[in-house]
Amino acid sequence: MKLIDKEFKMNIIKIKYFASLILVVMLILCSFSYALNTVDTGFRLEAGNSVEIDAHNNCRNVINTGLYNIFIPTRTLSEWQSFINAVQQISYININDCAPSGEWVQIFNNSYWTCCTGCGEPFTCSWTGSEWSLANGDGGEGYIIVKGSWADGYRPTKIRVTYTYFVWASGDDDIYVRNSSSFWGTIGSDSSYSSMKELELSNTSGDIYTLRFGYPSDVDITNIEFFQP
């Protein structure tokens, strides 16, 4: 009986020992996990999640669409660049440039713009209180120009225009952003523009002066936004 009691006590001690050992291992792993997610240690990206990493002046958004967690080495530029190059061949890991910091700003109403009916082909233009209405039944073009001095020295990197139109003729919509130093100087253009499409602008081509809308119809512009970094 005493022998059985002694063996029982030894088993209890062993169970407690292994339980303590497992707890210590779990704590070490947890500590290691929490120590990650810095440029010096690298990043742990769980399955189905994404992370934005700005390391060595190279910011990327990494998306893990797979079933397993991955480790992203970033301690050195070489490690980070090697990872970026390698994942191009891995279907379940997507990597993109980080979205530029900044914001979209609405510069839309008649406090900022006015009609320019003497510009280009004849057309009608009006501010209705909620939208710009430009009409040329022959599918021509229309202009609005800067009002006041808000554009002096203003250097947004993109423009986004929201509009609807009533089709009169076939053809692509187009948009031109022109500067004040030369009426025909182009800051940005797109000959196949569509509503809410982001258009890159040159910030070295002078101040914004006019927006020219070429379109296959009459057009109602319901928003004009600029992206400022």
Image: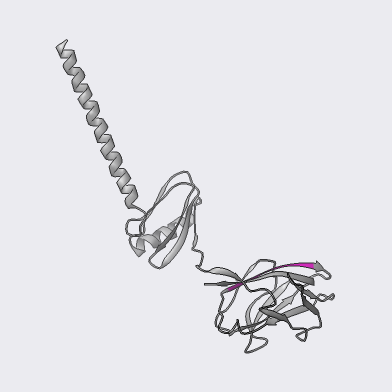
Q: Quadrant of residue 170?
A: bottom right
* Image height of 222 relative to 41, above or below: below
* Quadrant (top left, top right, bottom left, bottom right) of the N terminus: top left
In the rendered structure, the answer to whether residue 83 lies left or right of residue 22 reads right
- Is residue 77 or residue 50 the one in the foreground? 50
In the rendered structure, the answer to whether residue 147 lies left or right of residue 65 reads right
The residue sitting at 42% across, 66% down in the picture is: 58
* Image height of 2 relative to 14, above or below: above
Residue 158 screen position, x and y as percent: 59, 73
Magenta part mainly helix, strand or loop?
A: strand
Number of numbered discs: 0
Q: Is residue 87 magenta?
A: no
Query: What colouring style does the render use?
Result: one colour
Residue 85 screen position, x and y as percent: 44, 60
Q: Quadrant of residue 52?
A: bottom left
- Is residue 225 or residue 54 the one in the foreground? 225
Residue furthest out toward the bottom: 181
Residue furthest out toward the left: 2
- Is residue 101 or residue 89 the one in the foreground? 101
Residue 93 screen position, x and y as percent: 48, 52
In the rendered structure, the answer to whether residue 170 lies left or right of residue 57 reads right
The residue sitting at 71% across, 74% down in the picture is: 174
Q: Is residue 160 magenta?
A: yes
- Is residue 159 or residue 62 the one in the foreground? 159
Q: Can residue 172 be seen here? A: no
The residue sitting at 41% across, 49% down in the picture is: 70
Residue 100 screen position, x and y as percent: 51, 67
Q: Can residue 51 be seen here? A: yes
Q: Quadrant of residue 162?
A: bottom right
In the image, which residues are magenta? 158-165
